[in-house]
Amino acid sequence: MGLWKSLRGMLQIEITGADISRSLRRLNEAGITLEKIAVRGNLCISACVAKGDYPRLVQLLEPFGDEIRETKRLGIYWRLRSLRHRPVLVAGLFLYLVFFLFLSTRVLFVTVNGSEQVPARYILEQARGYGLSFGVSNREVRSERIKNGLLENIPQLQWVGVNISGCVAEISVEEQPEQEKVPNADYPVSHIVAKTDGVILSCTVREGNALCSVGQAVRKGQILVSGYTDCGLTIQAVRADGEIYGQTLQSIQALVPAKAETRVNSQKEYHVYTLIVGSRQYSWGDTRMWESDPSDSVKTVQRYCLTLPGGFTLPVTLEKTTYTFYETEETVTVNQWDVSEYAKRYLQSHMIAGEILEIQEDFSQEQDALVLHGKYRCKEMIGVEVPADLPGQKDLPQKE
């Protein structure tokens, strides 16, 4: 019995009558097919008939005195029909099928292999920012994007691979080999020079020849610690090493708009779709968008690539571009305190190390802008290392 007949359902029957051959001719003329016919006696045969043909068979033979008896039900149809009396089992099988089809397309477990120096939790946090997290669809996971993001944000990693098998995503990493710190061969001899004008507050020299002292005023670019030391008959050349702190005076003049327009409510939203097949593009979408100026909107782009199992990406991409137009209102954006805090953060970000000792700020209003004139007395590290030139008179320590 084939699959199609099994799904339709079959019946095994016994036909008892005075003239069996005549009954078989009647069924053949009516187009009813019997299978697996077996003779049980002179007046009885057994056969299999399709469930749909059984009522017609009964209508044809019973008027002539034939007796039809059903002996067995065959096929998948009858097994499925019997489940009607077991609703709990049917509900359980249905939920199992739904969960199986749904959960098999989701990432439920993420593992990290090969990490020794970098904590696995940190790698998982970074991967979450690139779309690999619990419950995400397998189709939304972009292995190349995750790999490039991890290599960019975690310099200790040398190689990253992302594989998905069923509900499990595996991140395999290889870390950079540990190397001993060696002097930079690009410039074996270096000086420490002043990066800005100032007055020396402290001077700690570990390698090289100190050419400055506490209380001395220095100018930007002046050599504070030389990599060359005059030892009489010879000159010792080293990489200068030390910490030079000085008092500096910094000035900042900033012009900040006092008011600006901010987005309040979304007025309208338009979608444009683009199918990219190789180098060809086919676009369609809401044509009303072109009646407005796209530069006044917020543009967001979503890309869906056609990816085969194994991570191979075909040159077919669907790009969805959304243009959202907002209502705007004029708001006050900054005040004196905000500008002052920004100026202090700016100074701190340009210091190697140090702090602000004294602040003098003056604010004025010019049309729709807030103007800051500030002077700041700071204590900061002013010595920076630079490569030394070839040995010459200008590099040698100058004697008083």
Image (cartoon, rainbow, N blue to C red):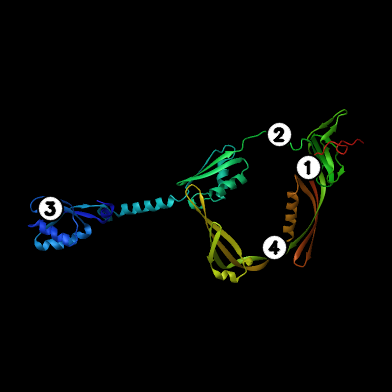
- How many residues crowd around disc 4 within 10 Å: few (fewer than 14), some, or many (20 or more)? few
**Label 3 to label 2, Cα distance in Å?**
99 Å
* Residue under numbered circle 2: 182
| 3 or 4: mark nearer the eye | 3
The kind of secondary structure element at disc 1 is strand
Name the kind of residue labelled 4 in the image. Answer: Thr
Name the kind of residue labelled 3 in the image. Answer: Ile
Q: Quadrant of residue 123?
A: top right
* Residue under numbered circle 1: 384
* 131 vs 287, nearest the viewer: 287
**Label 1 to label 2, Cα distance in Å?**
19 Å
Name the kind of residue labelled 1 in the image. Answer: Val
| 3 or 1: mark nearer the eye | 3
Residue 320: image x %, image y %?
54, 61
**Label 3 to label 1, Cα distance in Å?**
108 Å
- How many residues crowd around disc 3 within 10 Å: few (fewer than 14), some, or many (20 or more)? some
Disc ID at residue 333: 4
Residue 356: image x %, image y %?
77, 49
Residue occupying image coordinates x 59% and y 45%? 150
Residue 377: tell me if it is visible: yes
The kind of secondary structure element at disc 2 is loop
Residue 146: image x %, image y %?
56, 48
Name the kind of residue labelled 2 in the image. Answer: Val
* Tags 3 and 2 touching, CB below 8 Å: no
**Label 3 to label 4, Cα distance in Å?**
97 Å
| The residue positioned farthest toward the right in the image shown | 400
